């Protein structure tokens, strides 16, 4: 990964926890409960965020939602620029998504291309009733007409900035920073 100069602490562990709690309440309210919802985390950091969201919903509602893992590698529109032999990880959806509400979970919404790839992957798996999107951070700069249903924090950024989500499950700590690309 490129060297980035940390510029701003955007969210600490407590702010992240509060955002996930708020999103959990919003999901329950918008869907009038949690019946027929399947959480699907977009690999890599969307997966632990989906697990945290499921745990929070379980704390509130007393029922555990299924959590799936979605690898979008083969659905990316920049696949040919990534590698001649991209590494494809497992996609694991533990429940039938036909006729259900699929709630995609990711860490940062930026151009919308990751979500577009995830939508293609989900449609290849089944035919959900609806697909919703939850993100921890929406930083703007959309290239596609995609909008999140649930957002932990909206952050205006410049194109030179990078939003980095650090999760204890992956990185050993919980925090979100805005970093600057070197010139």
Image (spheres, helix red, strand yellow):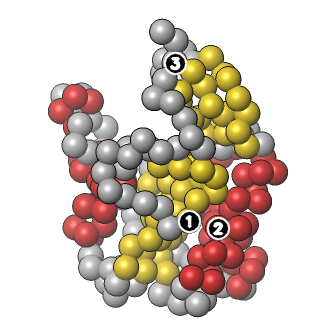
Q: Secondary structure at mark 2?
A: helix
Q: Which residue is mark 2?
A: 23
On screen, 153 above or below 104? above
Tally the numbered discs: 3
Q: Secondary structure at mark 1?
A: strand
On screen, 53 above or below 178? below
Q: What distance separates the C-alpha of mark 1 from that of mark 2?
A: 6 Å
Sequence order check, earlier mark of 1 and 2 = 2
Sequence order check, earlier mark of 3 and 1 = 1
Disc 1 vs disc 2: Cβ atoms closer than 8 Å? yes
Tell me residue 39's x, y (percent): 50, 70
- How busy is the neighbourhood of tag 2: few (under 14 within 10 Å), some, or many (20 plus)? many
**Residue with the most extreme top position:** 183
Residue 172 in sight from this viewpoint: no
Residue closer to the observer: 125 or 136: 136
Disc assigned to residue 176: none
Tell me residue 56's x, y (percent): 71, 70
Q: Residue at x 43, y 80 (%)?
A: 101
Tell me residue 150's x, y (percent): 56, 65
On screen, 169 above or below 58? above
Q: Which residue is mark 1?
A: 150
Q: Secondary structure at mark 3?
A: loop
- How busy is the neighbourhood of tag 1: few (under 14 within 10 Å), some, or many (20 plus)? many
Q: Which residue is mark 3?
A: 181
- How busy is the neighbourhood of tag 3: few (under 14 within 10 Å), some, or many (20 plus)? some
Instruction: Answer with left or right where residue 121 lies relative to residue 1.
Output: left
Q: Residue at x 44, y 54 (%)?
A: 42
Residue closer to the observer: 12 or 41: 12
């Amino acid at each position: 990964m490129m060297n980035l100069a940390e510029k701003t602490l955007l969210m600490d562990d407590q702010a992240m926890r509060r955002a996930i709690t708020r999103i959990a309440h919003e999901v329950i309210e918008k869907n009038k409960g949690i019946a027929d919802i399947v959480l699907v985390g977009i690999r890599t950091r969307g997966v632990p965020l989906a697990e945290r969201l499921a745990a929070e919903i379980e704390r509130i509602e007393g029922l555990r939602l299924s959590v799936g893992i979605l690898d979008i590698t083969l659905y990316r529109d920049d696949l040919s620029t990534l590698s001649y032999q991209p590494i494809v990880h497992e996609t694991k959806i533990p429940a039938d998504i036909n006729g259900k509400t699929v709630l995609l979970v990711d860490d940062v919404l930026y151009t919308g291309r990751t979500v577009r790839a995830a939508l293609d992957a989900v449609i290849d798996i089944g035919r959900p009733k609806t697909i919703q999107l939850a993100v921890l951070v929406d930083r703007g700069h959309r290239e596609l007409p995609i909008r999140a249903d649930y957002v932990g924090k909206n952050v205006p950024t410049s194109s030179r900035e990078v939003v980095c989500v650090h999760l204890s499950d992956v990185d050993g700590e919980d925090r979100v920073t805005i970093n600057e690309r070197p010139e």
